[in-house]
Structures are given as structure tokens and as C-alpha cells.
Amino acid sequence: MTIPASQYKGWKEKLRHLVQSDPDPGKVSLAMALGFSAAFLPPFGFHTLLVMALGYLFRVSVPLAVLGTWINNPWTFIPVFLPSYVLEINLGAILLEKKLNFPSLAVLSRMPYRTVIAQIKLVLWPFIVGSVVLSFAVFIVSFFLIYGFLKYRKGFSSLPL
């Protein structure tokens, strides 16, 4: 008999129940990797909806996928995602063979509105292409790391302590 998640106290117990409710490490890894990789895609503000649709489409735990995408949040934006966006734009520019000159933020803040829009248009396609490539790389790496960790933990969970 399983105890419903609502009876668990504390976020650690709820997370443990969420991960252990599906005994297939492949599905748990896929759900989390979908969330992690979607966090690096451009649809700002719509990552949760995107991951909910992907989780449903791939028949994995939607709450785990949503949890994975929440690595993209206001606290992680500056230290993690701002540098990754610059990386994505540069990667996309290399793949599209475009030469980009980034103005500094100070220069951008003094530019007229139309010039800022023109700058955004210059980096839009490189940003999209770089985002997709980086997102795919994050998916592959996070899937195998989570899968390996779950298989490692499963091997030790059967040992009597």
C-alpha cells in the first residue's frame, strides 16, 4: 500500500515520493532532462507550458518535468542563464557563419529604440539556433547523469542497512 503524497511532510519527502513513484529510472530521467533542456530554450515565460506538453507527449511525469524546468528562475538568471544566452548567441553565430558585434550594455542603454530592435534582430536567429543546440546537449548530459545516479541509488537501496 502506498502512502499518498499529501501525507508526506516537508519538501524532501514529497520530492522523494515523486521520484520513487515511478520505478523506471529511464522515465524519471527523461522527465527531468526534458525540464532541464527546456529551460535553455527561448520561449521566455512559457517553459512550464512547453514542458507540460512535452511530458504529456512522452508519457512521463509532468510534475518532474516542470520541476526540472524551474532551474530557470529569477535567482539563477544572472549567474547561470545570462552567460548561457551569450554562449548560445555565439554558438549560433558560428553555426550560421555570421559575424556579430555585441555592443556593451551601457551603449545599448543609450541607443534609440529602433536601433535596439535592430540589434535584437541581428542576434535572433543565432540565439534560436544556439539555444536548440545547447538545449539538446543539456538534455543528453542531464539524462545520462540522472539515469546513472538513479541506477546507482537503486543498486544500493536493495542492500540491507
Image: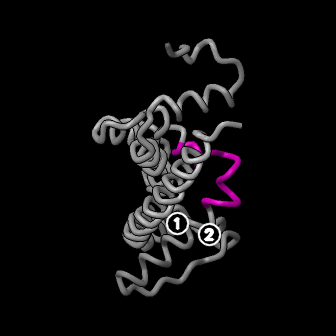
Residue at the image position 44 percent from the left and 55 percent from the top = 42
Please state, as top left, top right, bottom left or bottom right, where the C terminus lies in the image. Answer: top right
149 sits left or right of 38 in the view:
right
Identify residue for label 2: 108
- Along the polypeptide, which appears first: circle 2 or circle 1? 2
Please state the horizontal and vertical placement of residue 152, each as a whole percent of the image: 57, 52
Dividing the picture into quadrants, the one containing residue 54 is top left
Relative to the observer, which residue lies in front, 124 or 40? Answer: 40
Q: Amino acid at mark 1?
A: Val
Spatial separation of the CA atoms under disc 2 and disc 1: 7 Å
Identify the magenta region: 68-81
For the residues bearing labels 2 and 1, Cβ distance under 8 angstroms: yes
User: What crowding class fits label 2: few (fewer than 14 Cα within 10 Å), some (14-19), or many (20 or more)?
Assistant: some
Relative to the observer, which residue lies in front, 143 or 57? Answer: 143
What secondary structure is found at the residue carrying circle 2? helix
Please state the horizontal and vertical placement of residue 63, each as a whole percent of the image: 48, 32
User: Is 152 placed above or below 94 here?
Assistant: above
Question: Does the magenta segment cover residue 101?
Answer: no
Question: Does the magenta segment cover residue 73?
Answer: yes
Please state the horizontal and vertical placement of residue 11, each as a whole percent of the image: 68, 27
Identify residue for label 1: 116
For the stretch drawn in magenta, what is the main secondary structure?
Answer: helix
5 sits left or right of 48 in the view:
right
Please state the horizontal and vertical placement of residue 58, each as a whole percent of the image: 30, 42
